[in-house]
Amino acid sequence: MREDYDFIVVGAGLAGCVVARELAAAHFYRVLVLESRAHIGGNCYDKIDDNGVLVHEYGPHIFHTNNQRVYDFLLRFTMLNPYIHKVVANVDGQNIPVPFNLESLDMIGKGHLEDLLIETYGDGSSVPILTLKENENAEIKALADDIYDMVFSKYTAKQWGTTPEKIDQSVTARVPIRLDRTGTYFEDIYQAMPSAGYTEMFNKMLEHPNITVKLNTPFDLTMMTNEIPVVYTGPIDTLFNYQYGRLPYRSIDFVFEQYQNMVYQDYAVVNYTVSEDFTRITEFKHLTSQGCQNTTILKEFPTAYEGKVGQIPSYPVENNETKALYNKYLENVKKIKNLYLVGRLAEYQYFNMDEVVENALKLCENIKLNRT
């Protein structure tokens, strides 16, 4: 290993694949990618199931960005088919647009408050639910309480195991109240899906003579040498054998159901914010515009991550306490020569896909600067 490679990249998910490709192709390093799972792609891994449907094995992933550099980078490895993501919340059998917007306001019989909201916050603005709840106007506060109960309270309890007030506000701010009628989930310039799927995109990223991939190969610190730098994308607490305790994550139990129908629901994603034990149903054909006669849906049941066999750490639980715990592990990293971190798990942040790509590209630039 010392003679054959210039870098080791731990993890073949989004961050790891971008880093491996950039180090190999742009900076001419020989790269060994170690992946503990039996496949590349991390949680973005997709495949054709036995129902003939391209499914996302670990829940839906929709690419969206305003970052031209990130968009152009991915275009080197896939065609990106435009896709505008629309989500609804099933509230007592009624499908209400999410994020909650002016159309949603009409549907719950509160359209008369539109002018007041626009006058208070501005036409087209996005307002976090906790900000709306703090408004001193009685009508706005009552509306905020209604929206909180319909869209946020029970859904957050299922998704995060707590109330919105107890998680980092950057998380609840991802689904604000929007004072517009666009009905789209994301507002980014580019919203798209890879034409042949994420796994095929990752395969093309890793197709380079300077890259070697080894699957089913876990990594630990005893494999490090002073000569070969390591870019680590996995959970930071795992790397140090949970020295200071486990960083909390939410995991998801995925239940796939197959139907011999053309479609199951009218939207790609329907959130169940009040009823049901699951948080949402995804129907993949809406994401990928597949023309097959059958359909496959996915129900998601969030649960606490406990490190059990088969459990996947999906979402870091960000708050002041967990940030302090992460920083203790980060101090360990700083003491190790040639160890770099990148990605949602390694950096313990709830990044969007484009943020992961951008961070990976910046890391490669910094590595190159530090080694020249």
Image (spheres, rainbow, N blue to C red):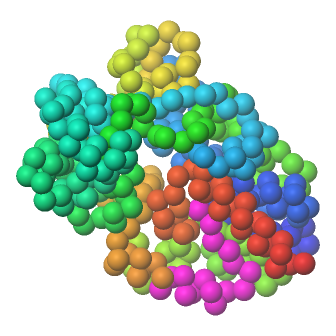
**Residue 334 colored magenta?**
yes
Q: How many marks?
A: 0
Closer-to-camera residue (110/123): 123
In the image, residue 166 lies at what x, y percent? 25, 66
Q: Is residue 230 left or right of residue 173?
A: right
Q: Residue at x 44, y 55 (%)?
A: 314
Q: Nearer the viewer, residue 278 or 4?
A: 278
Question: Does any portion of residue 253 appear in the rendered image?
Answer: no
Residue 319 point in image, percent of width and height: 34, 71
Quick one: which residue is furthest to the bottom in this view?
335
Question: In terms of image quadrants, where is residue 255?
Answer: top left
Q: In the displayed structure, would residue 39 be above or below residue 267?
A: below
Return the residue nearer the eye: 364 or 240. Answer: 364
Tell me what residue is drawn at x 60 percent, y 38 percent: 190
Q: Is residue 235 left or right of residue 255?
A: right
Give x and y (percent) for residue 83: 55, 28
Above or below 135: residue 338 = below
- Asked if residue 60 is among those painted magenta in the image, a careful observer would answer no
Screen quadrant of the N terminus? bottom right
Magenta segment boundaries in residue numbering = 328-343
Query: Percent from the top left, x then y, of residue 6?
Result: 86, 70
Residue in the image at 61% along x and 28% along y: 82
Question: Which image quadrant for residue 266?
Answer: top left
